[in-house]
Image: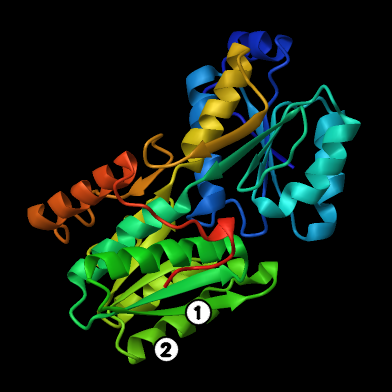
Amino acid sequence: MTAALVGCSLIACTAAFAADIKPAVVYDLGGKFDKSFNEGVFNGATKFSKDSGVAFRDLEIQNDAQREQVLRKFAKDGYSPIMTVGFAWATALGKVADEFPNTKFGIIDMVVDKPNVQSIVFKEQESSFLVGALAAMVSKTGKVGFVGGMDIPLISKFECGYAQGVKYASDGKDEVFANMTGTTPAAWNDPVKGGELAKSQIDRGADVVYAAAGSTGQGVLKAAADAGKLSIGVDSDQDYMFPGKVLTSALKHVDVATYKSFMDAKDGIWKPGIQVLGLKDGGVDYAIDEYNKSLLTPEIKAKLDAIKADIISGKIQIHDYMSDNKCPM
């Protein structure tokens, strides 16, 4: 286990720990520095540490069997709140939360209905719809791709939102190729397979490929750049990885959610229950930065902003795959 202590003075840390603020993060199998989902949580916790002067501790697990053991050890050592990253923590968290009723826990991407658990979920279909619409706007072939990580409903939620956005912006004309990387957690950390899937879609005519696959997505982005095509990143802003070749990233602000959860605990206003974050709440969005601004013309940005406003107002209704495990495409 490694402690992350950033900008923490002795006085500030002593005061914080005296108030029982002792945060921890346990990452999913993709790893802390996956340049995506896990790293977003790390960034949020690091910002909290810088702003508050409170240290946090974090750990990368190596296999599923460690989940209960790790959570129990952190709870026994007095850490609270403990943020778990990803749906795969749900079973272990459900057990350990009962054993430590006075410990605050958080989980991202799953609901665990316990009185001491804060469940944070996102409307990924909204950001995926936006980047799907963008893909259709810039595609010259009328064919775009999607590479998901583990074949689970949550990733199908990204795929379905993306397909809806593509169809919306192309009047139903554009074609979407979609592949999942695998059926086990290893699918989050296989950039070689991600690159192969992206290349296959490109060979079939796709000129924009969206990756929602954790570390596997790095292979997707590289394959697209190598082929002279465009890619779309996910969760964190990945535009910098291949400047001018990453069209945008579908942002999922796990960094903001983590920061707020820890800061609320520090301020004594942390609450358990379900938080659902979408475009309206600033929980999801699409990335605009120095690396992709040349790709987003004023006309395209105006169209995207109009779509975003219509989603927030409810004028555009996006189907949530998780509601029925179906996609109306």
Horizontal and vertical percent for residue 126?
A: 39, 52
For the question of whether residue 242 can be seen, the reply is: no
- Residue 119 to residue 28: above or below: above
* Residue 328 in sight in this render: yes
For disc 2, the marked residue is 200
Where is residue 154 drawn, in percent x and y?
Answer: 58, 59
Frontmost residue, 177 versus 26: 177
Please state which amino acid type lies under the numbered disc 1.
Answer: Asn
- Residue 308 disc label: none
Q: Where is residue 314 in the image (x, y as percent from the top left)?
A: 33, 44
Where is 122 relative to 4, above or below? below
Q: Which residue is drawn at 21% across and 83% down?
A: 141
Residue 179's mark?
1
Position of 304 compared to 79: left or right? left
Residue at horizontal 59 percent and vertical 39 percent from the top: 120
Residue in the foreground of this view, choosing between 161 and 270:
161
Image quarter in which the N terminus is found: top right
Provide the secondary structure element on which disc 1 rests.
Answer: strand
Q: Name the residue type under label 2.
A: Ser
Q: How crowded is mark 1: few (under 14 residues within 10 Å), some or many (20 or more)?
A: some
Side of 73 where 6 appears, left or right: left
| Marked residue nearer the N-terminal end (2 or 1) | 1
Is the C-beta separation of discs 2 and 1 under 8 Å? yes
Mark 2 falls on what kind of element?
Answer: helix
Counting from the top left corner in percent of width and height, residue 264 is at: 58, 20
Answer with the quarter of the image where residue 41 lies.
Answer: top right
Instruction: Kindly identify the residue that appears in the image at 25 percent across and 49 percent down.
Output: 288
User: Which label lies toward us, 2 or 1?
Assistant: 1
